[in-house]
Amino acid sequence: MDEDFPLIATVATSAILIFAAAEEEKRKRIWTRNWVKRREIHGAHNTLFQELRFEDRVEFGKYLRMMPCDFDYLLNLVSSKIKKQDTIMRCAISPSERLHVTLRFLAGGCSYSNLQYLFRIPKQTLSRVIPEVLDALWECMQDYIKTPNTAQEWQAIEEAFAEKWNLPHCVGAIDGKHVMIKAPAGGGSTFYNYKSFNSIVLMASVDADYKFTFIDVGCNGRISDGGVFASNKFIFDARQ
């Protein structure tokens, strides 16, 4: 029995290695589905995106809520932050495609499940890509929305409203938007609004040229417009 032990151990080890290799091969086959592998041929970034970009700029604007030149500008800002390295297993999703799917997510209100078929990117991957791109956009665009903080800056906005819109003594146009969310666990009816869905409120102010001068996001949807207006940081700062 003792003499046979090395042979038995060798056979058992070989069987384990063969089983592990088979499982790994099975995992790889499931890991990348065939329709996902054809992303570079049939995915929206290399088909619909290119067609709209070069053939119909108006529809491109409706599709991503911006013109191609604006897309290129954003891509130039965030490209270095969202670029990934290729591996021996697969090619990384390009910065352009990462930005494209993120903007489509924002513009169309599509779920990850719907986007995965349009872009041929699994929803598990999208759940990592989109937050990463959003973080990069936030970091790169910190200085693009600036609330006036001097009397001269406020006066310039007031003069523009008076000249362009015949609205004297106006320093901003304010409105809010209910952004639909999934109710947080244990949230009860805190986020349930008068439109009969759960939301957080985005309140924004723009100048006479439709440029944002202030944005406040996060107030729960149950609060009234007046409550949102009274409690946001913009009003709080003005009282100081």
Image (spheres, rainbow, N blue to C red):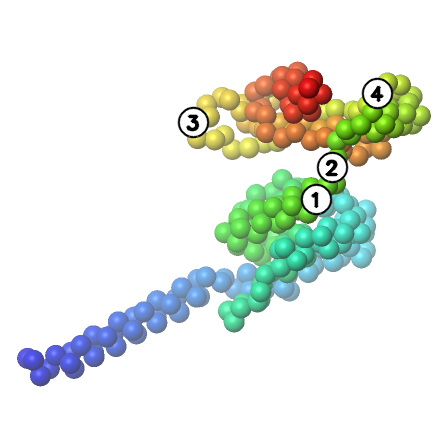
Residue at image point 66% right, 21% down: 236
Q: Is residue 198 above or below residue 71?
A: above
- In the picture provided, is 122 more to the left or to the right than 30? right
Percent position (x, y) of residue 145?
74, 37
User: Of the numbered discs in the image, which one, if any, rests on residue 19?
Assistant: none
**Secondary element at tag 1:** loop
Of the pair 49 and 78, the residue shown nearer to us: 78
Whole-angstrom CA distance, mark 3 to mark 4, is: 42 Å
Packing grade of label 3 (10 A; few <14, some 14-19, many >=20) is few
Q: Is residue 108 above or below residue 26?
A: above
Position of the N terminus by quadrant: bottom left
Specify which label sits upstream in the sequence, 2 or 4: 2
User: Of the numbered discs in the image, which one, if any, rests on residue 186?
Assistant: 3
Pointers 3 and 1 in contact (CB under 8 A)?
A: no
Residue at image point 78% right, 30% down: 148
Amino acid type assigned to the residue bearing label 1 in the image: Met
Percent position (x, y) of residue 215?
69, 31
- In the picture provided, is 199 more to the left or to the right than 210? left
Pointers 1 and 2 in contact (CB under 8 A)?
A: yes
Q: Mark 4 sits on what residue? A: 170
Of the pair 29 and 229, the residue shown nearer to us: 229
Whole-angstrom CA distance, mark 1 to mark 2, is: 8 Å
Packing grade of label 1 (10 A; few <14, some 14-19, many >=20) is few
Q: Mark 1 sits on what residue? A: 141
Q: Mark 2 sits on what residue? A: 145
